[in-house]
Amino acid sequence: MTKRRDLPDLDLLKGFEAAARHLSFTRAGAELHLTQSAISRQVQALEEQLGVALFERRTRALLLTEAGQRYQRAVADALARLRDAGARLAGDGGAGTLTVATTVSFAALWLVPRLADFQRRHPDVSVRIVADNALQDLQRDRLDIAIRYVMQARAGGAAVKLFGERVVPVASPRLLERAPLAQPADLANFVLLHYEDIESQAPWLSWNVWFEVMQMPPTSGAGALRFSHYDQVIRAAIEGQGVALGRVPLVNEQIRSGELATPLKASRYAAPAADRAYWLAVAPRSAARPEVVTFVTWLRDHAGAPRA
């Protein structure tokens, strides 16, 4: 009989992590080449083994419980470290391969959706993404490129600014068909999607701060859903579960594709995200490698940043 203190099976952890990231058993199954019911059984088995509920299952929504949010952070970090260790042991990182470190949100919402274009243009270059919200050291962690969301003082002397950031309410067009959102007061009729910034590193992503910057009285909306990861906030918005604060241009691709809309006039209701920006840093030992030069040029073109 399995004891609660035993380490869960790796397949259960992978199924849970994918379901928590997508907030969908169906999408998690598609990613792992399993059926929706197989992912559901994996999560149920993991919950039974841990003796705690990880998800709150609603009719049209799958949400993480508080325990599930804490466990997801630990599992995602552990799996990322295992993949990274395996890649190093397998020799991934040789000629023709470059390693790019960035934040989880930037990787999920901005970089990964555009990588297909880079691979199509440069099929001979292998790109390895290391997504971690911790500020990593290029030399110590043997990284080629880092895209950091920091203030200029922490970006590094040779770093290049890609773009800044603004926040503006975003929602699924399907949700907006059911109720109008023509002015900020209408937010009272919508569920508001919140990013739980436990360490207070991004206060500008708070609805209360947005209302304060807009000089408007705050509203709690028609309800609230809270998420531990920002990409989950955007996934919930795309699924029509409520209105989120969209980080522009981080969510430009989702707006361009029609998955999200900006019902309030962006030029008026977009709040600047403090004094941080996305900065590109290249390891000195990697700067002359052809594949690194190629990736940096492609990245600057997509970000609209000037070339060197």
Image: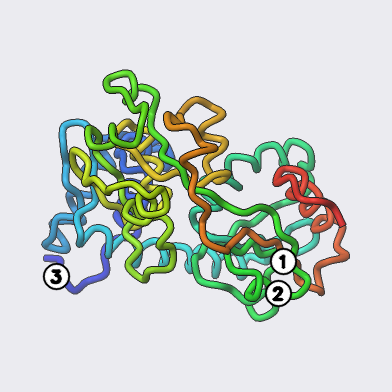
Q: How far apart are marks 3 and 1 (CA)?
A: 46 Å
Q: How far apart are marks 2 and 1 (CA)?
A: 7 Å
Label 3 CA crowd tier, 10 Å (few <14, some 14–19, many 20+) = few
The local secondary structure at tag 1 comes to strand
Query: Which is more foreground, mark 2 or mark 1?
Result: 2
Q: Is residue 199 above or below residue 64?
A: below
Query: Which is more foreground, mark 3 or mark 1?
Result: 1
Q: Which residue matches tag 3?
A: 3
Q: Earlier in the sequence, mark 2 or mark 3?
A: 3
Residue drawn at x 72%, y 43% as measured from the top left: 302
Q: Do labels 2 and 1 touch, CB within 8 Å?
A: yes
Label 2 CA crowd tier, 10 Å (few <14, some 14–19, many 20+) = some
Residue 264: quadrant of the picture: top left
Residue drawn at x 29%, y 54% as measured from the top left: 12
- The amino acid beneath tag 1 is Ala
The local secondary structure at tag 3 comes to loop
Q: Do labels 2 and 3 touch, CB within 8 Å?
A: no
Q: Which of marks 2 and 1 is nearer the N terminus?
A: 2
The local secondary structure at tag 2 comes to loop
Q: Which residue matches tag 1?
A: 281
- The amino acid beneath tag 3 is Lys
Q: Position of residue 301 (x, y in %)?
A: 77, 44
